[in-house]
């Protein structure tokens, strides 16, 4: 089956620093990837849609200058949390849509970010 | 607006059957998904319904009625490992997933 990886799986950083999270589709091409954030005991919240070769589309209320998304190839999208603050601590999950199938969407294992 | 409703929490007994309901109102419809999510982990795909009716996959079945904007996930022969949150999501006309808040299922021995 389709596999999506995320790196790192967890990270602790100091307030004010930046953190980059990678999302890779390992055995399929993904023109579209999605970045989600999930706070404890809450559902997934879509942050942005990442399209290969073009600018990401951000959801309302998500700061594009704070959460930088780059989708440079058909198998890799990155999310950089810039100038992280403790309130950015969350579980970040990416998913990738198989280019050949409209409805198939596969999730990465998630990255737990803790900002101290 | 777009809305997905599902119960916040349900409790069931090991070996029993439980049905988790989901109702939706979305801009367009390109299918309904059920995902399972254990605490601290990413969601895993359970089922996809785009046509009315029942889809059976082992102990799990999913039902869809598009005219009623309604779906349910049926879990049979419950096992302790089924304790998790179950997320209902609808793909809208833009192929974006609209997520419900999830139903936390607690299985008791």
Image (cartoon, rainbow, N blue to C red):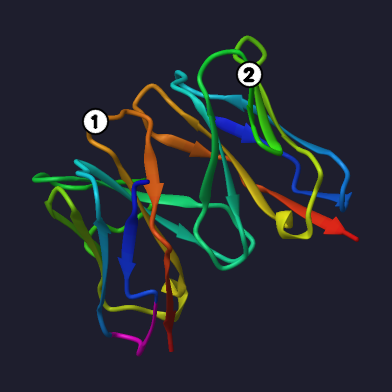
Which residue is drawn at the image coordinates 74% and 57% (left, top)?
B83
The residue closer to the viewer here, B31 or B4, is B31
Q: Is residue B84 above or below residue A2?
A: below
What residue appears at the point 60 percent right and 49 percent down from the top-left corner? B36
What is the C-alpha distance between the residues marked 2 and 1? 28 Å
| Chain under disc 2 | B
How far across and down, in percent of the image, does residue B95 sit?
36, 29
Q: Position of residue B72 (x, y in %)?
A: 70, 29
Q: Is residue B29 found left or right of A77 in the rendered image? A: right
Determine crowd level at label 1: few under 14, some 14-19, many 20+ residues with C-alpha closer than 10 A. few
A9 or A49, which lies in front? A9
The residue carrying mark 2 is B69
- Secondary structure, mark 2, is loop
Residue lying at the far front in this picture: please name it: B58
Mark number, residue A100: 1
The verdict on residue A11 being magenta is: yes
Q: Position of residue B71 (x, y in %)?
A: 66, 25
Q: Nearer the viewer, mark 2 or mark 1?
A: 1
State the extent of the magenta-drawn residues as a range: A10-16
Quadrant position of residue B23? top right
Identify which residue, B69 or A104, lies in the foreground: A104
Relative to residue A50, is residue B16 drawn left or right? right
**Label 2 environment density (alpha carbons within 10 Å; few <14, some 14–19, many ≥20):** some
Q: Quadrant of residue A89?
A: bottom left
Tell me, for residue B4, which label it has, or none.
Answer: none
Q: Which residue sits at x=47%, y=51%? A: A45
Chain under callout 1? A
In magenta segment, residue B83: no
Horizontal arrangement in the rendering, residue A97 relative to residue B29 (left or right): left
Q: Residue furthest top?
A: B67
């Amino acid at each position: 089956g389709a596999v999506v990886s995320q790196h790192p799986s967890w990270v602790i950083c100091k307030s004010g620093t930046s953190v980059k999270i990678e999302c890779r589709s390992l055995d399929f091409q993904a023109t579209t990837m999605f970045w989600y954030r999930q706070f404890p005991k809450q559902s997934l919240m879509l942050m942005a849609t990442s399209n290969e070769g073009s600018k990401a589309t951000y959801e309302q209320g998500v700061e594009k200058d704070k959460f930088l998304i780059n989708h440079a190839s058909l198998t890799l999208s990155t999310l950089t949390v810039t100038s992280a603050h403790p309130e950015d601590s969350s579980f970040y999950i990416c998913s990738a849509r198989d280019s050949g199938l409209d409805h198939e969407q596969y999730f990465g294992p998630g990255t737990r970010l803790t900002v101290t | 607006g777009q809305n997905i409703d599902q119960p916040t929490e349900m409790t069931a007994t090991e070996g029993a059957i439980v049905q988790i309901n989901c109702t939706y109102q979305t801009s367009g419809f390109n299918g309904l998904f059920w995902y399972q999510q254990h605490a601290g982990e990413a969601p895993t795909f359970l089922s996809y319904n785009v046509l009315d009716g029942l889809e059976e996959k082992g102990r799990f079945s999913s039902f869809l009625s598009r005219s009623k904007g309604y779906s349910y996930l049926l879990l049979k022969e419950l096992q302790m490992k089924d304790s998790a949150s179950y997320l209902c999501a609808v793909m809208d006309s833009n192929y974006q997933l609209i997520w419900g808040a999830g139903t936390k299922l607690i299985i008791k021995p």
